[in-house]
Image (cartoon, helix red, strand yellow):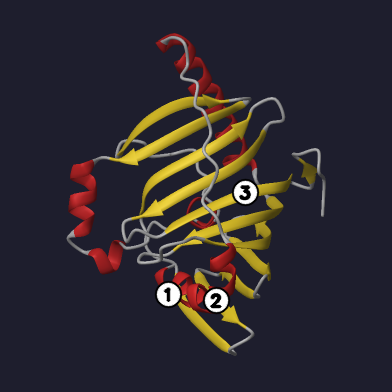
Amino acid sequence: MIRVLARCAVVMAVAAACAGAAPSVAVTPARAAGESRTFLDKSFALLRRITAGATSLNARITITQRAAGMQRPVSADCRVEFRAPGMLVKEVREPHAYTVTVSNGMVTSEFPATHECDTRRLAEGEDVLADFLGITAFPDPEPFDLDFAVEGSLYVVKAVMRPQVQEALARDLIRNARVAVRRTIWLNADQGRIVRTFRATLAHDEETCEFRSFWLNLEPQSAGGRQ
């Protein structure tokens, strides 16, 4: 992830100048602990349905990345195709093209403009949906402090890795650089779909995926349908 983001930072420098900060959103906390627990349970049920039941996933997203050391984020249009158990294609179309393919336990990043190609193995514990699209039901929530909020009509699940866990991972930063230490997932429970995900890694890289259309197992999960 670090090499891909760094490469993209150079290739997409023009886009960075035009990128702005994400708009702030007013957060309305749940009114009571019981209400928050109910909303959180509903959110996890939806995430489990998506992650456990996904045999295929197709989406159009806006992907916004900020590599460590970058002052401003870089945004791009992206097409995503996932096939269980672990095949993924992330095809960035605009403003500058590159493709990330995950297949047979290997990650390949191709940059047509520079005719460059990077290949690596999936890291131990790296998950295709969680670590390339930010979609997870937190099968092992123990390392995280979990929180919940409501933003308008959206349920928001937030996870921050506990400090002692981060400190242990930081002892081998090269090996654990891609590990997500902060995650946020925005859900539209009425439509039964994921709207947005955010993840920040131990190496301080950040990525937000805004799902403009979302097809799960060939069924549309948003009003926009296939694009």
Residue placed under numbered mark 1 in the picture: 3
Question: From the viewer's perspective, is the residue at label 2 or at label 3 nearer?
Answer: 3
Amino acid type assigned to the residue bearing label 3 in the image? Glu
Sequence-wise, which precedes: disc 2 or disc 3?
A: 2
Residue placed under numbered mark 2 in the picture: 109
Location of residue 93 with respect to 39 vertically, above or below: below
Give the image quarter of residue 174: bottom left
Q: Residues within 10 Å of mark 1 (few under 14, many from 20)?
A: few
Q: Residues within 10 Å of mark 2 (few under 14, many from 20)?
A: many
Residue 210, numbered circle = 3
Task: State the image coordinates of residue 151 (x, y, percent, origin top left).
Answer: 55, 27
Sequence-wise, which precedes: disc 2 or disc 1?
A: 1
Q: Assign the N terminus to one quadrant of the image.
A: bottom left
Question: CA separation, marks 2 and 3?
Answer: 21 Å
Q: Residues within 10 Å of mark 3 (few under 14, many from 20)?
A: many
Question: CA separation, marks 1 and 3?
Answer: 22 Å
Please count the marks in the image: 3
Helix, strand or loop at mark 1: helix
> Which residue is pictured at 64% across the width and 75% down the height?
96
Residue sitting nearer the eye, 14 or 103: 14
Badges 2 and 1: C-beta atoms under 8 Å apart? Answer: yes
Residue 161, numbered circle = none
Question: CA separation, marks 2 and 1?
Answer: 9 Å
Task: State the image coordinates of residue 23 (x, y, percent, origin top left).
Answer: 55, 42
Give the image quarter of residue 121: bottom left
